[in-house]
Structures are given as structure tokens and as C-alpha cells.
């Protein structure tokens, strides 16, 4: 249980939008609005050296984990790594660990009906009972169940892989936001009942579908899954995607003026009208996929 909780800390605040973990059976594939690529070069508007934008999933089975050569080459050209949060910051990791625990037990916070629903979901998906995780937040429980939906025990993290590489190369590591800010967005985006409804949709079959989109680098269909109206209303989309994307793009320019940066954020943030790619283009940058 301790190891499972420890793993979940890496994804507690951002697993939803990064992994597209709530793909629905009735979603139809669409003609991609963006080229199928997780890696994008950012240039123009007076920056001396290009920076790079890469879409991640915060957890994926080891058998599906792959850092392609073109990604490694782009990473090696940069001098700074920018993640959603700084996974190498001890204070941030401490804040994340503290955030796993709720202010009050869920059995007291939730209604009787909600507690029954959540207990049934936990037993079905994770082989746990509510009293085993009663002191954790709904976000932590969501991460635990999402991790179980991968159907493997050898989960790996792209963020931690890049952190390891950055430290070996003496690159600076920064976060685009703080853990506390992520949790505020998450708490504002979903009510407890909405989170429980989301948990009902998490299963191995749908996670496999999401993973295939990721492996195919199909960020358009990945975005379509993430933003399906049945699981993400306008309020949720605003808090989980749009506001955060706009925040990041507001100070990315200053970072890119100073040096070449490798930005690694959840793949669900890349596509869409308010996605990072389009926002950077609207800001006047040339953003092109690196396909080879």
C-alpha cells in the first residue's frame, strides 16, 4: 500500500488531463487538426535558439515507455528542463505528499450515498475498501484507481526520466506551476460527486485506448478524449486545461529569450484552440512538429 501511495504522488494533481484517462466508447476518431507528433520546435519572435515542447503521460507501463531518438536529440540541445511542477524540488514533493491527505476523513466529508458508491468503485477497481483510504483526498484516490487501470506493476514516468537526464547533464530544472496551484485548479474543477462519476469510467480497456493514441502520437484524438462533454464540462475544461495553458504561455517567452528550454507537459495540453501549440502560434511563434 505504501508503494502504491508513493507512486500515486507523482500523478495526484495532473493525471486526469495528462493521461486522457476517461476516454469514452462513443467518441469517434477525428481527422487530426495537428500533425501526429508529441515533439514540437518553438522558434521565431527574436529567440536566438529554438526551444522544444513535448507531450508526456505522467505514468505508463514500462513495456509502453519509449523516449525516441529525436526527443533525446532535442533534449540534448537545451539547457533547461521545464515541467508542470519541479519534480526535483524537495519542497514541492513535500507539499505533494502532504496534499495526499485530506482535512477530514472521506467517510465524514461524503454523503452516505457517495461513500457507498466510492466503496463499491474501490472494491471493484482496486481491491480496497473506503476505510483503508479514508484519510486520503479524492484526488489521491483518483490517482490510485487510475494507476490500477493501467493493468501493470512496472509503471514509469516521463517526468522522472527527464529529471534524471537533466541532473546528469547539469541542466536547470524548473516548474511551470506549484503543487498547491495544481490542487486548487483540481478542487475548483470537480465536485466530489463529479470525481466519483469520473472514477466509474476508469478501466483497463479505456486506458489501453488512451495509451494507443499516445503511442501513435495522435494528440488531436487524445485531446478529443480528454475534453469529451460527458466527462469534462466547460467549467472543468477552463480550470484543468485553458487557464493553466494560458498561464504557462504567458511566461514561456521570457524563459525562451534567455536560453533553449525543453518543456515537458501532459499531452492533453498540446492540442485544441486553447492548447499550448495554438496559443504559442497566436503569440507569434513558429511551432512545428519534429517528425524525424
Image (cartoon, helix red, strand yellow):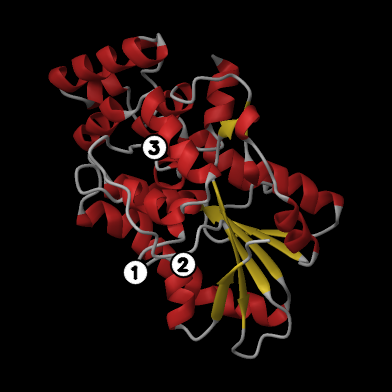
- Few, some or many residues within 10 Å of mark 2 (<14, 14–19, 20+): many
Residue furthest to the bottom in view is: 46
Q: Quadrant of residue 81 in the image? A: bottom right
Determine whether, in the image, residue 106 is placed left or right of residue 178: left
> What is the secondary structure assignment of the residue under circle 1?
loop
> What is the secondary structure assignment of the residue under circle 2?
helix
Mark 3–mark 2 distance (CA, rounded to whole Å): 20 Å
The spot of residue 176 in percent (x, y) is 55, 61
Specify which label sits upstream in the sequence, 3 or 2: 3
Kindly identify the residue that appears in the image at 49 percent across and 76 percent down.
280
Kindly identify the residue that appears in the image at 53 percent across and 39 percent down.
96
> What is the secondary structure assignment of the residue under circle 3?
loop
Residue furthest to the right in view is: 169
Which residue is label 1 attached to?
Answer: 273
Q: Which mark is residue 88?
A: none
**Dots 2 and 1: beta carbons under 8 Å?**
no
Which residue is label 2 attached to?
Answer: 276
Residue furthest to the front in view is: 31
**Dots 1 and 3: beta carbons under 8 Å?**
no
Question: Observer-nearest residue: 43 or 124?
Answer: 43
The spot of residue 172 in percent (x, y) is 76, 61
Residue 130 at least partly seen: no
Mark 1–mark 3 distance (CA, rounded to whole Å): 21 Å
Specify which label sits upstream in the sequence, 1 or 3: 3
Question: Observer-nearest residue: 186 or 16?
Answer: 16
Which residue is label 3 attached to?
Answer: 21
- Few, some or many residues within 10 Å of mark 1 (<14, 14–19, 20+): few
Question: Observer-nearest residue: 195 or 103?
Answer: 195
Amino acid at each position: 500500500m505504501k508503494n502504491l501511495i508513493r507512486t500515486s504522488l507523482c500523478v495526484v494533481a495532473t493525471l486526469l488531463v495528462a493521461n486522457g484517462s476517461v476516454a469514452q466508447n462513443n467518441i469517434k476518431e477525428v481527422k487530426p487538426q495537428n500533425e501526429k507528433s508529441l515533439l514540437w520546435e518553438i522558434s521565431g519572435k527574436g529567440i536566438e535558439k529554438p526551444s522544444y515542447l513535448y507531450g508526456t503521460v505522467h505514468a505508463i507501463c514500462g513495456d509502453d515507455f519509449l523516449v525516441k531518438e529525436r526527443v533525446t536529440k532535442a533534449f540534448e540541445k537545451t539547457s533547461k528542463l521545464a515541467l508542470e511542477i519541479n519534480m526535483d524540488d524537495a519542497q514541492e514533493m513535500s507539499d505533494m505528499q502532504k496534499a495526499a491527505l485530506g482535512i477530514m476523513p472521506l467517510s465524514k466529508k461524503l454523503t452516505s450515498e457517495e461513500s457507498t458508491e466510492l466503496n463499491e468503485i474501490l472494491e471493484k477497481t482496486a481491491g480496497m475498501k473506503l476505510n483503508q483510504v479514508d484519510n486520503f483526498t479524492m484526488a489521491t484516490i483518483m490517482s490510485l484507481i487510475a494507476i490500477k487501470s493501467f493493468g501493470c506493476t512496472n509503471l514509469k514516468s516521463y517526468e522522472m526520466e527527464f529529471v534524471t537526464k537533466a541532473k546528469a547533464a547539469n541542466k536547470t530544472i524548473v516548474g511551470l506551476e506549484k503543487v498547491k496551484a495544481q490542487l486548487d485548479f483540481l478542487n475548483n474543477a470537480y465536485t466530489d460527486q463529479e470525481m466519483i462519476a469520473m472514477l466509474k469510467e476508469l478501466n483497463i480497456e479505456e486506458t489501453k485506448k488512451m495509451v494507443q493514441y499516445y503511442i501513435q502520437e495522435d494528440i488531436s484524438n487524445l485531446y478529443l478524449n480528454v475534453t469529451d462533454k460527458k466527462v469534462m464540462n466547460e467549467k472543468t475544461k477552463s480550470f484543468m486545461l485553458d487557464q493553466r495553458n494560458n498561464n504557462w504561455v504567458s511566461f514561456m517567452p521570457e524563459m525562451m529569450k534567455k536560453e533553449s528550454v525543453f518543456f515537458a507537459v501532459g499531452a492533453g495540453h498540446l492540442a485544441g484552440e486553447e492548447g499550448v501549440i495554438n496559443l504559442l502560434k497566436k503569440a507569434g511563434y513558429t511551432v512545428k512538429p519534429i517528425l524525424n
